[in-house]
Structures are given as structure tokens and as C-alpha cells.
Amino acid sequence: MSDIASLPTGSRQRQGSNIGQPMTRRDGILKVTGSATYAADNNPEGLMHAVLATATIARGKVTRLDVEAARAHPGVVEVMTPENRPPLATDPDEKTNPFAFRLDALQNDGVRYAGQPIAVVVAKTLEAAVEGAALLRPSYETEAARVDLEGESFVAEIVGPGAPGRAASGDFDAAFASAAKHIEATYDTPPQYHNAMEPHSIVVRWEGDSLSIDMPTQGLAMAVGRTAELFGISPEKIHIRSPFLGGGFGSKGLAAGPQVLGILAAKLVGAPVKLVLTRQQMYGPVGHRGQTRQTVKLGMGEDGRLAAIEHHTLTSTSRFDDFLEPASNVTHSLYAAPAIRTTHAGSRIDIGTPMFMRAPGEAPGSAALESAIDEAAFAAGMDPLDFRLLNYAEVEPISGKPFSSKALRECYERGAARFGWSKRPQAPRSMRDGEGRLLGWGVGTATFPAIMFQAEARAVIRADGSGLMEIGAHDMGQGAWTALHQIAADGLGLSMDEVEFRSGSSDLPNAGIAGGSGHTATAGTALHGAGEDVIARLTELAVNDEASPLYGAGNVGVVARNGRLVRQDDESRGEPYAAILKRAGLAEIEGRGQSAADPAAQERYAMDAHGAVFAEVAVDPNLGQIRVTRLVGAFAAGRVINPRMVESQYYGGMIWGLSFALHEEAVHDKRTGRIMNANLAEYRVPVNADVPSLEAILVHEDDPHVNALGVKGVGEIGITGTVGAIANAIWHATGVRVRRFPIGLADLLGGTPDVSDKGV
Amino acid sequence: MNLSLTLTINGERREIVLDDPRVTLLDLLRERLHLTGAKKGCDRGQCGACTILVDGERINSCLALAISYDGAAITTIEGLAEGDKLHPVQQAFIEHDGFQCGFCTPGQIMSAVGLIAEGQACDDPERVREAMSGNICRCGAYKGITEAVIDASGKLSAGKERDAA
Ligand code: FES
Ligand code: FES
């Protein structure tokens, strides 16, 4: 466990001591015994299995399906195609709001990317449904497809979740032209697929015109909303349970076509249906991270001080919808420069629409920027960490706003000390390990915005003095069942065991979306508010009741402590919750809490989490094989609710960074537009043996502005510094600057003239 | 066509009649016997989420046709704990936070139990990482997984020595 500075005391932490404790997971026993129920683990009576058939071309239309053959297969009940698919109330291609992405729900015979669903086979057994789908043997009218970035591009005015596609401060052209030194480099990042371990799935049952659904989702309320709209039923008639997600990473944030098809199939056959994607089917209809080509221009003085930064991103989107990886925007907040310009362009290609994927924008954006900064440091003859400190942003560079808090200097310091950075030789190719491998050290700065969504929570104190907290939050592995329960217990001034915590279901108060690293902040603030509200109501009862020892204590203030309300000026005077409720004749008392970003604080401050990642790599000089041998990350992200879970988030993020740097890439066949490695063997993600010694340092940070709890977010930041740190370490090891990701041995072979005939 | 086989699953002998030879061991457990602890992450032997023990050895149950296992003894994640008492590997996974979403966890744990039984050097992190590399964890809980395996195998062998003494 990393050392954690003690948490601030005082009014913010008023009621309890659960926050900040490294509790083990509340859902741990369920998960290690196999009793945690993921959506596909549900097997209601009379269940039928639905299996998708997907397009093997990337553009064109389906001209024939052998529906007869499929139907004739024993066990097959029905084949759903555009011909017989039950109607929808809203066209899945209609954009009713900016987050309603166009879905493929068999609305016509068109094919707009490889892997698009073109039919659904429903059968009594899974085996029969799989066979039925194979028997459809589609014929197509095929059009030429494009899947690379070389086609026509357009200026992207809106990127990511509605952010402006361009921004500027100062006069970039003038500042760049007059700078003493210049760096200009272009970096490529590939299409990446989330590949949560749990495939997208749905178990769905129609009960009249009501829907009962088990489905993993990072946004229960939004999933209900979209389903209601598509099926023309009121949201109250839809109940979605999502107690556990087997990973999400952004791919389960918004309703996806396959799940809509599951609901349609259940309607068509009039029975409960289970539809689970195969691994291969996850490469298409459920989002991915679009490929990027980023050009970074840096102008600096002789002393290495940055004068101008430009970051331009060309990125892919589908032919039929827009989601553009906002990669340039990371440059808004990272390094100080009087002139900054960021722009984006899009390229329409024949792929499924890209989507949010862990650290959308920041992950590829910082991969490019951190590489370019390293190139600039070398050109300036400076240590890369010194160069970053020289160009440290005291205020947000693009806006001039102060940061609500920023402990990045401490992150650099603590990370560097732990790593041993001060011993780093400046020149590349100057370290070897005992086996003769080239060693390199690199650093990258991590950053991710502190985002708040809207949420509500409900708090109850019961007659026996115990508590209940409710919020429709989502646990995709980050530890919501634990961290939010800790916040809930503190909000009620009770121990965790005295508080029942309900979550993961759409009939609970709306917790917003588990994304943008904002879920703990958002849901936690709502829970905290609900706790305050119910305690205030209870206080109201006590201070106005002559029989209470707190009678008349309204002015001095009353606080909640271990199931009792006590006077703030004398904690020995007070009484248990149960006594107050009993005298009032109440079975329970209820409070509500809300959370949302504070517009005034947002107007005044830039709010981000920060960190610094240090990487060591060893490169085989003959084979070019790259191993990451050490990763040290130091992160400051406001208040830490549960250090054990936060460390795990950082480790996971850093492993994703390692994966970005060295492993994952979806490779398209340019002739057919199909992905050639749509599986977990050839789309490489790190296995245990790929992961080196990892350390995460949790740097203490108080933030009075982000929200009432002072929580930022930890889910995504770990990727952002890590990719650049590894790329920079590879350069330091080999002297070869690779500007495409993932970096592989082929990129290193022949990289330097002196040894090109013998290896790296 | 009906095929019958006998399996001992988590200590319980079960006579199973299958109407279909294509049923894998994983689908038999999950879809027909409703033992849903073992997970399907790929159905291709590429991820390890479906790992179970067959006659004490870890296998990917998605690659195993059920009918070819007549007479086998199968242990799944549901059969590991003794009542409320967790198996040391399960306990160690909780203590070392060896999981996040938990979807790969049944497979990781069964793989770890198999690995320890294989008697591979479970005090060497390098060996453990290598031997656990058939089980992908997309959440990246590898550090905790490795620590948990080392911890549990130490406790198990200490327990064995105690029993022997
Ligand atoms: S489901 Fe069996 S190895 Fe992936
Ligand atoms: S815990 Fe999520 S995949 Fe391993």
C-alpha cells in the first residue's frame, strides 16, 4: 500500500471515518465464489438464445439470406431480418439527442461496416442458434470500401462528446515563426477496441408492454431513455438491472445495436431471449477508439522555454455518424506557452462509429504530445523532466484560468525520487542491463479532467437507527459497491455494516453515467448530499423537541456521530437516531441529494487530475524485442475514497498505457475492409507476463472547488502519462524515435546506422 | 439423438443427457446446469475466463466437448469454498485486490488452484506471471493476481507441512 497522507479533518469530513480507508471490496466474496451475477448469467424460465449474423463486407447491401436453411435447422425458432423485424417507434438512425448514436437494428438491407448485424437467429438452444446463423450464407452487392485515413477529410468543428474542435490562445503563426528552435512531428495511433472481458449481452423479457432487462450498462438512466424512445413505451415500464459489469471502458456507456436487437427478438418470438456477442462481434457495432494521425509543432527559445504549440489531429469516424477522437485537446492544459492552437479533422470511412474509450482524446493525444515534448527536450539539450518543469503550467494555458488544485510538481518529485531518475544519463543508448540489453528511461505527464455529471440519491434512517442509501450507480470494476458505500456510511454517520447500500438498478435514483472518471465524484456527491439532507431533517426533529437533550441546540450546531446526533460544542450531549424517531413516532425519515457541476466554480477554475509516470524498458539489441521492466506512477487526484481501489485503478490505467504503447492495434484488410485480428489472440492485450513491476504513489491533494467531497477521478489518468513515458524510454534505450503506435520490434530494426546490419 | 454421460461436478455425481453433440463443457455448465461461475470471454481458448479443473488439471472448458468427458471429475469456482470458508486462493484474491470487474476472476482463481497443484515454483513472481498468462485480465489486475497466487501458495504449502508434521 502506498503511503497516504492523512485526510483533512473538519466540516467536510464531518460524520465518519470510512472515507479514506483501504477496505477490501464489498462485492469480493461474490466475485471470488462465482456468485456475482453478470447479465448473461441469468437463465429465466423458457429462455431462448439469439445469435447475430454479421456482415462480411464493409460496404454495400445484403441481397440474399438463406432463411429457409436456417429455419429448417432443428431447434431454430425464428430468423429475424429487415423483412420481419418488429417495428420501432423511433428510427434508430434518428439523432434525437447528441448522445443518441445511430444504431444498426435491421432497419434496412444496407451494410455500412464489416461486422454489422444483418440478421438474428433465435433458437431453443445456443448450439442451434449458432448453427442457424452460419446457415444464412448471405450474398451481397459489394461496393469498394475505405478503412484508412488517406481519403477525403473534413474540418471537425465538434469532437468527442460535444467539445469544440478548435481552440487558440495567442498568435501561433507569429510565435512559431519567430521561435529559435522548432520541432514538427507526426504520430500515428491505430484503431483500438475496448475488449472488456465480458461480451455485450442482454437477457430480456417482455411482460405485456413492460420490459425486464439484464444488461451491463455504464448508464442505466440513459439506457432506459433510449430504449423507451426506440420502443415507444414509457420509461417507467422499463427495468434494467446491471449490478456488475464485466468491464466497460466506454463501450457500455450508450445503448448499442445488438442489445436493441435482443429486445426486438424477444418481441418477435414472444419469449425471454438471451443475446450475447461473440468476441469477434465486439469489433464493429459496439464502438472503438478511432485511429489518429497527429501533427505536433513546438516552437521554443534557446533556453527551452516553449513559445508556441500546435496540435492537429486527423481521425476516423464512420460514414453515418460522428464521433471524433478529441486528441488535440490535451494540449489545452498540459504545458505553458503563450501561443497554442489546436485543430481536428475527420475522415469518413467504412467502420462502425468510434466511441468513448478509456481516456478518449487524452490517451492518443498525450501519446503524441509527450513524445513531441521529449523530442523538444533533446533538441534543447535538456533532461526531459527539467524541460517539463521549465514549461510547467501554473495556470491552464489555453484559458489562463487558475487550476482548482494541481499537485503535479509533487508528482514529478515523488515519482522521480522513487524511480531514481536523477541517475539518468542524458544521451540515448548509454545504459545496458546485465544481459546486455539496451536500457532506457522515459517520463510522461499524466492528466485528465475532473468531470461532474448530474445525479440523485436517496437516504433513509430507519426506526432502529440503521440506514439505507440508494443510487442507480454502476460498478464496472472501479469499486463503486465499496467506495460509494463508504461515502454513504459517512454521510449518515454510521458504520458501513449499519448502512444498506442499494445500487446497480434502474429503479433507483439516477446516478448519471459511469464515465469520464466522474462517477465517484458525481454519485458520491449526491450520496453525501442525501446524507446531509436526512441528518438535517432528523436534527430539525430533535432541536424542536423539548424531550430531546438537543432541544434548542439549533444555533450551536448538531453533528452526526456513530448513529447519534450530538451538540457540536459538547459531543457528550446527544442521543441516538432511534430515540429521536421513536419519540416522533416515525418508522423512518428520508432525505434526498443531488449533484451537478458547479457552473461558478467551472467558470473560475480549470479542474484536472495530474500525474507523472516513469518507465524503464529493456530492448534486445539483436532482436529489437521490447520489455517494460519498471513503471512508477505518481498521481494527484483530489480526495482518495479508498486507496486500495484507487491503486488498482492506476495500475489498470498504466497497463492500458503499456498496451497502447506496445500491444494493441486492430488491423484492417484494406481490400475488404474487414478486421483481420478480431479476436483475443491476435488483437494483443497484455497478459500477466507482459506486466512489469508496477508502483503507484498516491500524492495528497486537497481541492475545495471540484465538489463537496473534493474528489477528482482516477479511472483514466493512468493511461495518459504511461504511453509517452514508454515511447520515450524506448528512444532513450535505442536512439530510435518511433512515431507510430504500438511500437514493435520491426520499428526498431535497422533504426540506427551504426548497428543496422546487426540489429537495433 | 440423445447422448448420456456421467460427470462428478464439485463432488456431486450427475447423470446428464444431451440432445446435441456440439455442446461444450462451458455451455453445458452455464446454459444447461446453470453453474454460471465459469465465464465465456472468447469461446476460442484465447482468454482463460472459462478455466475449470478436470480431474485436477486446469483446462479451457470452451474448447472441450462435453461428451468427450464422460466419467470426469470437474471442479468449478462454485465448488472451491467449503461452505462459508473460502479457499485460500479466493481469500488471497480479495486481500490483494486481484480483480476489478471480476469477470476473469473465476478463471484466474481456478487457474491459480491448478497451477499450485502442478507444483510449479509459486514463490517466484516471474514463474507465476508466465504460468498465469493464459488468463487475460482486461482490467489489469495482474499485480494483485500475482501477489495473491504467491501468498496463497505459501499458505497452502505451510498448511501441508503442518499436516505432515
Ligand atoms: S472463453 Fe474459454 S478461453 Fe476464452
Ligand atoms: S477483473 Fe476485469 S477482466 Fe479481470
Image (cartoon, rainbow, N blue to C red):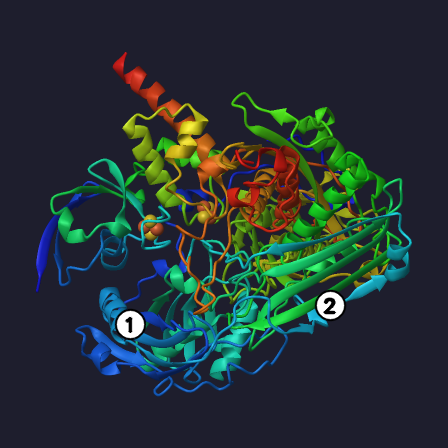
Q: Kindly identify the residue that appears in the image at 88 percent across and 56 percent down.
A: A177
Does the rendering let one see residue A177? Answer: yes
Residue A130 rendering spot, x and y as whole percentages: 27, 67
Does the rendering let one see residue A583? Answer: no
Q: Compare marks 2 and 1 and give the one earlier in the sequence.
A: 1
Give the secondary structure at mark 1: helix
Residue A107 rendering spot, x and y as whole percentages: 44, 84
Establish if A647 lies above or below A452: above
- Crowding around mark 1 (Cα neighbors within 10 Å: few <14, some 14 to 19, many 20+) is many
| Badge 2 and badge 1 both on one subunit | yes
- Crowding around mark 2 (Cα neighbors within 10 Å: few <14, some 14 to 19, many 20+) is many
Q: Kindly identify the residue that appears in the image at 40 percent across and 30 percent down.
A: B128
User: Tag 2, which chain?
Assistant: A
Left or right, residue A162 beside residue A394 = left
Q: What residue is pinned by disc 2?
A: A165
Q: CA distance from mark 2 to mark 1?
A: 42 Å
Amino acid type assigned to the residue bearing label 1 in the image: Ala
Q: What residue is pinned by disc 1?
A: A133
